[in-house]
Amino acid sequence: MTRRWTLFDTTALTFGFAFLYLPLLVLVVYSFNDSRLLNVWGGFSTRWYVELWNDKVLLTALRNSLGIALFSAAIATFFGTLAALALVRYTRFWGRPLFTGMVYAPMVMPEVVTGLSLLLFFVSINAERGFWTVTLAHTSFTMCYVAVVVQSRLVAFDRTLEEAAQDLGCPPLRTFFTITLPLIAPSVLAGFLLAFTLSLDDVVIASFVTGPGTSTLPIEIFNKARRGLSPEINALSSLILLVVTVAVVTSSLLSKRALIPAR
Amino acid sequence: MTNVRTDARKRDSLAIGAVRRDFAPWLDPAAKPLIRYEAVTKQYSDFVAVNNLTLNIYEREFFCLLGPSGCGKTTLMRMLAGFEEPTAGRILLGDQVVSGIPPYRRPVNMMFQSYALFPHMNVEKNIAFGLVQDGVPKNEIADRVAETLRLVQLTPFARRKPDQLSGGQRQRVALARALIKRPKVLLLDEPLGALDKKLRSETQFELMDLQVNLGMTFLVVTHDQEEAMVMADRVAVMDKGTIKQIAPPGQVYEQPASRYVAEFIGDVNIIEGKIAEVGEHQVRVTRSDGAGTLLIDLQNEPVSVGQEVAVALRPEKLVLHRDLPTDTPNVLSGDIWDIGYLGDWTIYLVQLASGQIVRVSRANSRRFVEQPLTWDDKVHITFASEAGVLLTH
Ligand SMILES: Nc1ncnc2c1ncn2[C@@H]1O[C@H](COP(=O)(O)OP(=O)(O)OP(=O)(O)O)[C@@H](O)[C@H]1O
Ligand SMILES: [Mg+2]
């Protein structure tokens, strides 16, 4: 019953993949270019990787970014999961529509508005801007994504499982940790990864709320790119690409394993 | 191994008979019920699922709930387990009103109609769950799980996850999980529905053993009347949130309280009529189809001349004749309309002159009958006056 590949299929697939991945391929190839010029091939070299390794500014920015992403994603996952539980479990409470709207609003809010309002907020409470203000800002806008991801799983969750646990003598909080959480864990993890990526990726909000000493990687790359592209950025991007690929493959393998339990 | 098992089965089922024969606390006015539903109503927004229902269940009783889909059986159990609160009325367990007690503190375990097995735990972990919650020592848990696995014949599947089991196997896991804590009251919502006939009757006996040996009280929902007949001390027939009759299985079958119960339990023929004459022990009923009268034994309920009644006749109490018998007061005449051969029984559908179809069943006690009845044969059905049940509503 396997369908035969037509010429059209092959062409469409080739162009599709080329469109998606050719730029990335060019990026990786040119990160090994010996020449300083971006469009001239000067032979194979790893000098930009070495230069990157010695670039204190970029490395600090990388460390900041990873730290912010980690913390903000963790906090966002915690609160996002709670919000999802409230939305799914307590279907009738006063002001629920407003609450729902408020949870989702940050997803459609223009980043400039979010960034500006957060900046004003931090200024007004006199918070010293830097690592923690960016972390908080990222938490506030990634939380809703976690809520959405976890909610979709919770809606399909069979509540008689919790009833069965309680019936067998398990109090509600323990039921949550032994039954509910393990079963929604994949979506919580997915929410975390999404929040992490969104935080790592953000330029606009971070530029608003960060302080003088703290720069994140996307901001730094953006700055460098404006001053003129350097092959060093290619090297950095290639590394990020590598990390992302490994992460995606691992997580998909993990989720496959979760679906087909070992016999 | 198998021999030992069957021997044990024989001995135990004999023991059951001995215990159950004189078990009838509901007849004793001094006996105190273990479970009491007192005028319980459960309303879901605009739908009344349980309507002003009163029910007493006694300690060590095996109680079956029978009724059509959606009549409130599960709701009744969920209120006792603590997942729903009654809208009105109250439920007592022993001397305690249960409302307000959370499910995890009630001495009641429930087997869910949907099984509700924990998908991330294997069979063993699922079954052990209740004991783990109670902090039972590890080695005791292991022993009891092994014992329960044997009981439900799932030992080879201990390490499997629920999604690697068949429907019947899952059902047995759910059963094992609910009964491992040996609660005072065990609620089973269709515990054997997915099992094949052989495994089902085996499990029925295992359940009865357990119930007697451990002194538990069982409240069981079943769709299978035969199952209720085999297992229950008493059954309740429900309809639209109310109970139509509570009685031991034999009584529900032989003395149904209403037409609804008669038609719900087993097969029945209903002949409509009017009381023509009330004697000391018997009444004469004029058939509405104009084909004569019937002589029926008078039952507990008083009737008066002119009252509309229905006579309920069970198919196995009817006798088929080729020639019109002379010595019987009750004759229904017609033609054979259809025949169903079931092996042990043959079902004859006889069409009366009025067009009504009457179902007659006959045990095939002989391998060959010389002149078997066949389609369109003229036949006469007779029955004793005590075979008919007078139903006034
Ligand atoms: N949460 C609920 N909200 C509204 N109606 C409900 C709810 N739960 C049950 N009902 C209704 O109450 C009635 C009784 O339901 P219940 O589950 O007790 O039926 P049942 O006798 O167990 O039926 P079945 O044999 O099909 O399991 C049904 O008509 C059902 O639609
Ligand atoms: Mg039900």
Image: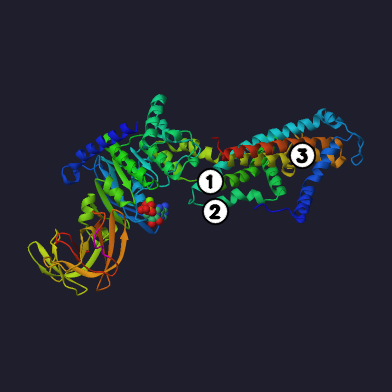
Residue B324 pos. (x, y %) = 16, 69
- Gap between marks 2 and 1 measured at Cα: 18 Å
Task: Say which label, 2 or 3, has the lower sequence index.
Answer: 2
* Residue pointed to by mark 1: A154
Which chain does the residue under circle 1 lie in? A
Question: Residue A218, labelled with which disc?
Answer: 3
Report the amino acid beneath label 2.
Pro
Query: Is residue B135 rendered to the left or right of residue A211?
Result: left
Q: Is mark 3 within 8 Å of ligand 1?
A: no
Question: If the image is split into quadrants, where does the N terminus of chain B sit?
Answer: top left
Q: Nearer the viewer, mark 1 or mark 3?
A: 1
Report the amino acid beneath label 3.
Pro
Question: Residue A97, labelled with which disc?
Answer: 2
For the residue pair A134 and B378, the one nearer the viewer reads as B378
- Residue A133 visible within the image: no
For the residue pair B158 and A49, the one nearer the viewer reads as B158
Of all residues shown, which one is farthest toward the front? B370
The segment highlighted magenta reads: B369-373
